[in-house]
Amino acid sequence: MEKGIKETNEALVGFIKLSAMLAHEFKDGIQATDIGPIIVKMQSEPLKSALLDAYNGIEEVPSELRDVSLVEAMSLIPGLIDALGDLVQAVKK
């Protein structure tokens, strides 16, 4: 029986969105003053929801990946493309 890939998708998208935010904040180097804006952004939408979705159910990811089908793997691509677009834009800014 297929488990689905909901939690895997949410974990991947959340990680990429977090990476995009951190890339933007650390673009000029890592500084102690970056902590405040990072915390504010992590507590603000839409990042907050993406992180909560990624965290809730993370324990299901390994079993989802053991059971993933080609169709399920391919269905991850659109969400990843959108999230990667955010990462590219954050690096460009």
Image: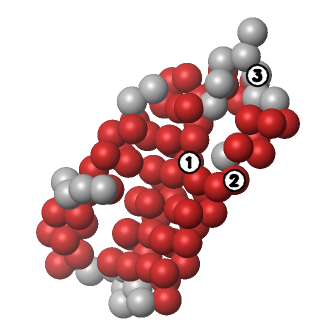
For marks 3 and 2, the one nearer the N-term is 3
Please say if 55 is above or below 36: above
Residue shown at 32% from the left, 56% from the top: 47
Dots 3, 2 in contact, CB < 8 A: no
Local packing at callout 1 (Cα closer than 10 Å; few below 14, some 14-19, many 20+) is some
Disc sitting over residue 12 in the figure? 1
In the rendered image, the residue lying farthest to the top is: 1
Residue shown at 53% from the left, 62% from the top: 83
Residue 20: x, y in percent? 45, 69
Nearest to the observer: residue 37 or residue 81: 81
Instruction: Return the residue at label 2.
Output: 77
Nearest to the observer: residue 8 or residue 78: 78
SS class of the residue under badge 3? loop
Specify the amino acid type for callout 1. Answer: Leu
Quadrant for residue 78, please give it. bottom right
Specify the amino acid type for callout 2. Answer: Ile
Disc sitting over residue 67 in the figure? 3
